Image: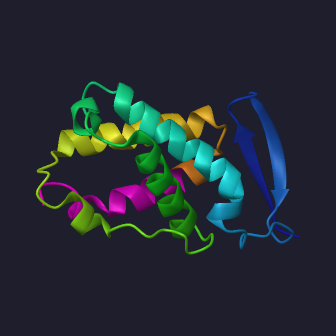
């Protein structure tokens, strides 16, 4: 039996997980709440971008409902859900926008805030941010 003791900082308590019994194969898609959960997160991410003074000007002329749909389908497809994203790849979508590293980090902050608002666990937050950060070279100064 392989047990892992962890500290839950939200409740200032300790717990135990049996790693042999825990299925680590559950997709990120499922752990984020499937289509419904990811759509809520994506909507909050876009709302955060629009309200964020560091990047709001980038979205001033955007079709916000279409952007929310694109963000949701991108997240759904990218996290192991159905292949529903029909938009451009990240490089094509951001080419010529001259997005700065500061703007990119502001967008990651917006994503983190949306994940936290939707009560997404720490592990899943880290996975999402890792994936988003891995796209940096396709977004910043391209």
Location of residue 97 with respect to 1 vertically, above or below = above
Which residue: 60% across, 53% down? 124
Location of residue 13 with respect to 137 vertically, above or below = above
Where does residue 98 sit, x and y in percent of width and height? Answer: 11, 50
Image: magenta residue range: 126-142
Q: Is the magenta stretch mostly helix, strand or loop?
A: helix
Q: Can the viewer see residue 123 in this picture?
A: no
Where does residue 52 sit, x and y in percent of width and height? Answer: 33, 27
Where does residue 96 sit, x and y in percent of width and height? Answer: 11, 57
As drawn, is 135 to the left or to the right of 66? left
Q: Quadrant of the C terminus?
A: bottom left
Question: Is residue 131 rendered magenta in the image?
Answer: yes
As drawn, is 47 to the left or to the right of 136? right
Which residue: 70% across, 30% down? 10
Task: Determine which quarter of the picture holds residue 109.
Answer: top left
Location of residue 49 with respect to 120 vertically, above or below = above
């Amino acid at each position: 039996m392989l047990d892992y003791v962890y500290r839950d900082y939200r409740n200032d308590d300790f717990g135990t997980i049996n790693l042999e019994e825990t299925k680590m194969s559950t997709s990120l898609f499922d752990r984020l709440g499937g289509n419904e959960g990811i759509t809520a997160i994506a909507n909050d991410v876009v709302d955060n971008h629009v309200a964020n003074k560091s990047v709001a000007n980038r979205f001033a002329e955007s079709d916000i409902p279409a952007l929310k749909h694109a963000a949701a389908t991108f997240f759904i497809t990218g996290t192991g859900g159905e292949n529903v994203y029909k938009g451009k790849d990240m490089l094509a979508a951001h080419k010529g926008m001259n997005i700065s590293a500061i703007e990119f980090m502001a967008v990651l902050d917006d994503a983190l805030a949306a994940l936290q608002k939707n009560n997404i666990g720490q592990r899943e937050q880290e996975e999402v941010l890792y994936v988003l950060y891995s796209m940096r070279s396709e977004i910043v100064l391209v």
